[in-house]
């Protein structure tokens, strides 16, 4: 399966600020909490490539291109990137997969506590309510608390999906809808990048917490 996306994401150390939740609530973005999970990322130096093991699947993520930094509001700017993703089911046993995750220095275990919101398309002049998003095309907002070893961060991201020729427009519509109106929080362009760059900046694992077995919880 190949998924094509356009994304803009920010990473900051620490816990999710209350102002982020308050802004999303005012913007009418109802977040749905997802079960916590642990993803295992292959440690790479390439910011345009991501490899991870997630819930019995191998997922590959490759950056196609970058649209550069765009201004979303006078207080917010972010780097827009287009990605391709492949997902493969793994038939091996949990024991075999855990063996694959050795040596620990090659992999990064990342705990994620995610909450998602599907950003509806903006209203047209003749619509009283926004049109529903297509299951094959749209944009999700993801607010995530992430932990890798002793490193605690949070991330806010928009991910538009659908045909390659539509994802940038879908992303722009979604961000315009949320960043128009009520004052959003300050989001810096310097903190805007994808997971591969964030992972590349983490220190090497230095304690057992940096390597969690598949299926384990923390």
Image (cartoon, rainbow, N blue to C red):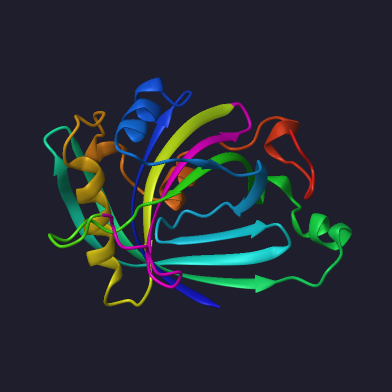
Residue 36 in the image: x percent, y percent? 65, 41
Spot occupied by residue 96 in the image (x, y as percentages of width and height): 85, 62
Q: Position of residue 154 (x, y in %)?
A: 46, 33
Front position in the image: 193 or 134: 134
The residue nearer to you, when weighing 21 against 49, is: 21
At horizontal 21% and vertical 57% (from top left) the residue drawn is 123
Q: Position of residue 155 (x, y in %)?
A: 43, 38
Q: Is residue 17 above or below residue 206?
A: above
Q: Nearer the viewer, residue 9 or 195?
A: 9
Examine the structure image and report whether residue 149 is included in the region drawn in magenta.
yes
Quarter of the figure with residue 26: top left
Residue at position x 25%, y 44% from top?
Answer: 178
Q: Residue at x 68, y 36 (%)?
A: 210
Report the front residue among 122 and 39.
122
Residue 153 highlighted magenta (yes or no):
no
Number of numbered tags placed on the structure image:
0
Quarter of the picture holding the C terminus: top right
- Drawn side of residue 93 relative to residue 103, left or right: right
Does residue 188 sit above or below 1 in this rendering? above
> Relative to 18, is 37 on the left or the right?
right
**Magenta range:** 129-150
């Amino acid at each position: 399966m190949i998924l094509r996306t356009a994304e803009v994401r920010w990473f900051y150390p620490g816990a999710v600020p209350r102002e982020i939740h308050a802004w999303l609530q005012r913007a009418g973005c109802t977040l749905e909490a997802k079960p916590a999970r642990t993803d295992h990322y292959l440690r790479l130096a390439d910011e345009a490539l991501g490899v991870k093991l997630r819930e019995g699947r191998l997922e590959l993520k490759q950056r196609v291109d970058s649209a550069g930094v765009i201004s979303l509001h006078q207080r917010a700017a972010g780097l827009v990137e287009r990605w391709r993703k492949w997902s493969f089911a793994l038939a091996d046993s949990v024991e075999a997969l855990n063996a694959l995750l050795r040596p620990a220095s090659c992999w990064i275990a990342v705990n994620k506590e995610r909450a998602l919101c599907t950003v509806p398309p903006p209203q047209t002049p003749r619509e009283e309510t926004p049109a529903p998003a297509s299951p094959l095309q749209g944009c999700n907002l993801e607010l995530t608390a992430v932990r890798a070893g002793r490193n605690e961060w949070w991330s806010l991201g928009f991910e538009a999906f659908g045909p390659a020729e539509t994802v940038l427009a879908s992303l722009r519509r979604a961000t315009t809808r949320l960043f128009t109106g009520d004052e959003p929080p300050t989001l810096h362009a310097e903190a805007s990048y994808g997971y591969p760059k964030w992972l590349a900046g983490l220190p090497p694992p230095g304690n057992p917490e940096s390597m969690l077995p598949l299926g384990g919880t923390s």
